[in-house]
Image (cartoon, rainbow, N blue to C red):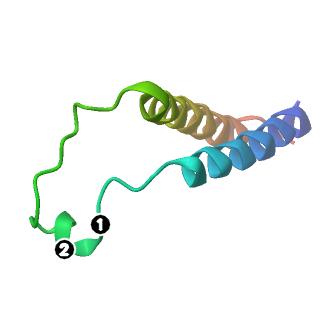
Amino acid sequence: MFWIVLVVFVIVSALLTVVVLMQEPKQSGLGDALGGGGAEFGTLGGAAGGLHRLTIYLACIWAALAILMQVIPR
């Protein structure tokens, strides 16, 4: 059972990496992060919104699998 969860964990990790790299940056750098511009958080629509939601879902699955791997005995 542990090895099945581990294989799924590795696949989800690779998918999460690909999805994060596919997203376009929302800020122009550290200057915007420190208050240099108004970020519009509620305007994610279309493909950007779908990638954002997919990132959240994959991250939740990844975290659940990480915890599950610690609970399941080898």
Q: Which residue is mark 1?
A: 28
The part of the image, by quadrant, that contains residue 52 is: top left
Question: Relative to 67, is 47 on the left or the right?
Answer: left
Residue 22, given in percent of the width and then of the height, sits at 58, 49
Residue at 86% of width from left, 40% of height from top? 7
The label nearer to you, 1 versus 2, is 1
Q: Quadrant of the C terminus?
A: top right
Residue at 59% of width from left, 34% of height from top? 58
Q: Residues within 10 Å of mark 1 (few under 14, many from 20)?
A: few
From the viewer's side, name the closer residue of 71 and 11: 11
Q: Which residue is mark 2?
A: 31
> What's the amino acid at mark 2?
Gly
Residue farthest along the front direction in this orientation: 46
| Label 1 – label 2 distance at C-alpha | 7 Å
Residue 61, given in percent of the width and then of the height, sits at 60, 31
Whether the residues at callouts 1 and 2 have beta carbons within 8 Å, the answer is yes
Residue 71, given in percent of the width and then of the height, sits at 68, 37
